[in-house]
Image (tube, coloured by chain):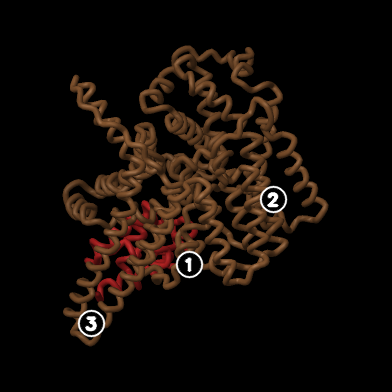
Chain colours: A red, B brown
């Protein structure tokens, strides 16, 4: 989770990533933000993020992202 | 006789009749009523080609069921296996599913491309041979294009992709798929909805309720106001200049670029009001296609406010899939090591934005000016992302607030210039005409043409200009109120009765009194129905 927060803070350190729960719905993370983030996550966590994973539920909060990462690492 | 949304036949005969029959039918029958109404509507434009819509519904229904079956078989066969083998079996079945999805997409896009782009290729091949002095010539084909093909094809692809990705379950009832793709208010101009947006609400077939009727009728009247009072008048001015564009330059080209943008907004968003209002009558909330686009601070924001459902479709089914494709991933791994973070990111943006804007341009039709229009936004959006770090630095360095008026207003004005220029190319008869018009802006500006009577020689008189000005003012006020969240369609319903009815009657009288009817005006076809 720490690595994830580091990546997120690297994108924008003015956002309170741990508490936000509507990153996509409130457009804190836009579509460019999402694809930049995906490439970071794939690199850092050695996972493959499929197009089917790109839904608001997986990116609305750091917690949701972390759950997705763990699920993809298990596969 | 075609049942276009702005015609008397649709508004005063077809729509009320469908509502009546729907109201007096049982819930099960209501579904049949809506499906049948869709096919009658379709028939009124394309006659026997209604078979194509039914075939598309059959194809995506079948593809959905097939993918579902593969999913289940894959699951059953992988049960109880060790994790490595389980994953291999799952992959094997996912690959099979992918083949079904790709076959479905290829068939749908193949037919769409053949019908829409075949003559475009023939014309361009002929041009190349003519330029080389060869006598080779291909005859353009006389193709009949089913109405609305560009809209329901995207919905159909979206449905299949959602089933493939497991975002939705394959539908077991063919009627529900048929209604999702063939709901008559949406056939001609969208909005392009996803299965999750509308399928359940349509299938529910809620009873007709008086508040929904009022909401729907007022929304339809609002759409007619925009179309008949403003757009149809502006279309006269726009056609006068575009039909003879070589005779105009300077301020007149600026006038027509602005006039066409406003015409397109009033027309397309007006049509969407009629469409969404029609949906309201049956208790269905169709997705919005416009959200005060002229308040956008940059081109990217503009596209989140203009033709929203097309942008959302392209984002979900082109932008994101491309962003996780092998090519982008390879670039990501390579570029991170060799060119640094910024260029890696820009490379990814270029690779993902290019197909989106190529598709956007091509979707509008097979003309070079549409492709140019797509590429225009591709370059602008990419440039916007490229200078983002500089913008951030300026804002930080000078302690500027990007929400303050001193920043926001110039941004909005800059976006207007981008929009007007884009729409000028969009309406032009080919790319060469677009470039000719753009260059001629700088050849003798002649500002006095705005007041020396030139504008009155374009088919519109002073009263017409007054009506257009009044219409734009009313729409602008409504958009400002909506933008500031002081007004929306639900809040309007909650207003005090006398205020509400004054507004309603005012709107209906404005449509009746100020509409462009009678001699000198022609009923103007819906622009987006041609795409």
Q: Earlier in the sequence, mark 2 or mark 1?
A: 1
**Residue B448 shows in the view:** yes
Image quarter of the N terminus of chain B:
top right
Q: Secondary structure at mark 1?
A: helix
* Count of numbered tags: 3
Q: Position of residue B12 (x, y in %)?
A: 68, 48
Q: Position of residue B303 (x, y in %)?
A: 46, 45
Name the chain letter of the residue that bears numbered label 2.
B
Q: Are marks 1 and 3 on the same chain?
A: yes
- At a point 21% along the width and 71% down the height, the residue shown is B91
Q: Earlier in the sequence, mark 3 or mark 2?
A: 3
Disc number for residue B218: 2
Disc number for residue B77: 3
Disc number for residue A40: none
Binning the other alpha carbons within 10 Å of mark 1 as few (below 14), some (14 to 19) or many (20 upward) gives many
**Residue B342 shows in the view:** no
Q: Secondary structure at mark 2?
A: helix
Name the chain letter of the residue that bears numbered label 1.
B
- At a point 44% along the width and 42% down the height, the residue shown is B531
Looking at the image, residue B428 sits to the left or right of residue A4; the answer is right
**Looking at the picture, does residue B505 appear above or below residue B25?**
above
Compute the Cα span from label 1 to label 3: 30 Å
Residues marked 3 and 2 touching at CB (< 8 Å): no
Q: Are marks 2 and 1 on the same chain?
A: yes
Q: Which residue is mark 1?
A: B176
Q: Are marks 3 and 2 on the same chain?
A: yes
């Amino acid at each position: 989770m720490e690595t994830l927060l580091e990546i997120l803070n690297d994108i924008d350190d003015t956002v309170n990533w741990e508490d936000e729960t509507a990153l996509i719905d409130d457009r804190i993370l836009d579509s460019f933000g999402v694809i930049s983030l995906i490439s970071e996550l794939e690199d850092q966590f050695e996972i493959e993020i499929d197009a089917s994973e790109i839904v608001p539920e997986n990116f609305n909060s750091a917690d949701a992202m972390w759950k997705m990462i763990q699920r993809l690492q298990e596969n | 006789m075609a049942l276009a949304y702005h015609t008397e036949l649709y508004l005063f005969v077809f729509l009320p009749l469908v509502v009546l029959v729907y109201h007096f039918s049982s819930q099960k029958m209501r579904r049949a009523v809506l499906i049948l109404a869709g096919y009658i509507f379709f028939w009124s434009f394309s006659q026997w080609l209604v078979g194509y819509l039914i075939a598309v519904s059959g194809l995506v229904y079948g593809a959905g069921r097939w993918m579902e079956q593969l999913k289940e078989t894959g699951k059953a066969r992988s049960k109880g296996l060790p994790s490595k083998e389980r994953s291999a079996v799952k992959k094997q079945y996912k690959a099979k599913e992918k083949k079904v999805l790709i076959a479905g997409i290829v068939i749908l896009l193949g037919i769409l491309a053949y019908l829409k782009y075949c003559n475009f290729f023939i014309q361009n091949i002929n041009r190349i041979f003519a330029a080389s002095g060869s006598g080779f010539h291909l005859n353009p084909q006389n193709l009949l294009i089913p109405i609305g093909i560009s809209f329901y094809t995207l919905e159909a692809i979206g449905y299949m992709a959602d089933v493939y990705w497991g975002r939705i379950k394959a539908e077991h009832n063919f009627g529900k798929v048929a209604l999702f793709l063939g709901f008559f208010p949406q056939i001609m101009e969208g909005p392009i909805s996803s299965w999750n947006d509308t399928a359940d609400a349509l299938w529910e077939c809620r009873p007709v309720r008086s508040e929904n009727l009022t909401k729907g009728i007022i929304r339809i009247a609002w759409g007619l106001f925009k179309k008949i009072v403003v757009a149809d008048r502006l279309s006269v001015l726009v056609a006068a200049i575009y039909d003879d564009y070589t005779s105009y330059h300077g301020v007149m080209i600026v006038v027509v670029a602005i006039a066409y943008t406003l015409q397109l907004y009033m027309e397309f968003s007006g049509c969407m009001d009629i469409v969404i209002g029609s949906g309201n009558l049956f208790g269905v909330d169709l997705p919005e296609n416009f959200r005060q686009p002229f308040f956008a601070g940059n081109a990217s924001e503009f596209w989140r406010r203009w033709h929203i459902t097309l942008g959302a479709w392209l984002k979900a089914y082109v932008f994101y899939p491309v962003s996780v494709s092998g090519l982008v991933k390879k670039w990501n791994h390579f570029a991170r090591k060799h060119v640094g973070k910024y260029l890696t990111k820009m490379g990814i943006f270029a690779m993902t934005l290019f197909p989106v804007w190529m598709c956007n341009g091509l979707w509008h039709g097979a003309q070079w000016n549409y492709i140019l229009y797509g590429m225009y936004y591709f370059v602008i959006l990419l440039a916007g992302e490229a200078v983002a770090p500089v913008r951030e630095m300026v804002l930080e360095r000078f302690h500027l607030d990007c929400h303050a008026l001193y920043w926001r207003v110039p941004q909005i004005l800059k976006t207007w210039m981008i929009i007007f220029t884009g729409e000028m190319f969009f309406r032009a008869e080919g790319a060469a005409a677009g470039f000719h018009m753009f260059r001629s802006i700088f050849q003798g500006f002649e500002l006095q043409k705005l007041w020396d009577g030139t504008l009155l020689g374009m088919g519109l008189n002073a009263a017409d200009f007054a009506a257009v000005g009044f219409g734009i003012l009313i729409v602008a006020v409504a958009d400002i109120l909506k933008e500031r969240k002081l007004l929306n369609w639900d809040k309007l319903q909650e207003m005090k009765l006398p205020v509400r009815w004054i507004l309603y009657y005012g709107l209906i009288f404005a449509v009746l009194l100020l509409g462009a009817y009678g001699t000198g005006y022609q009923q103007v076809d819906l622009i987006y129905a041609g795409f």
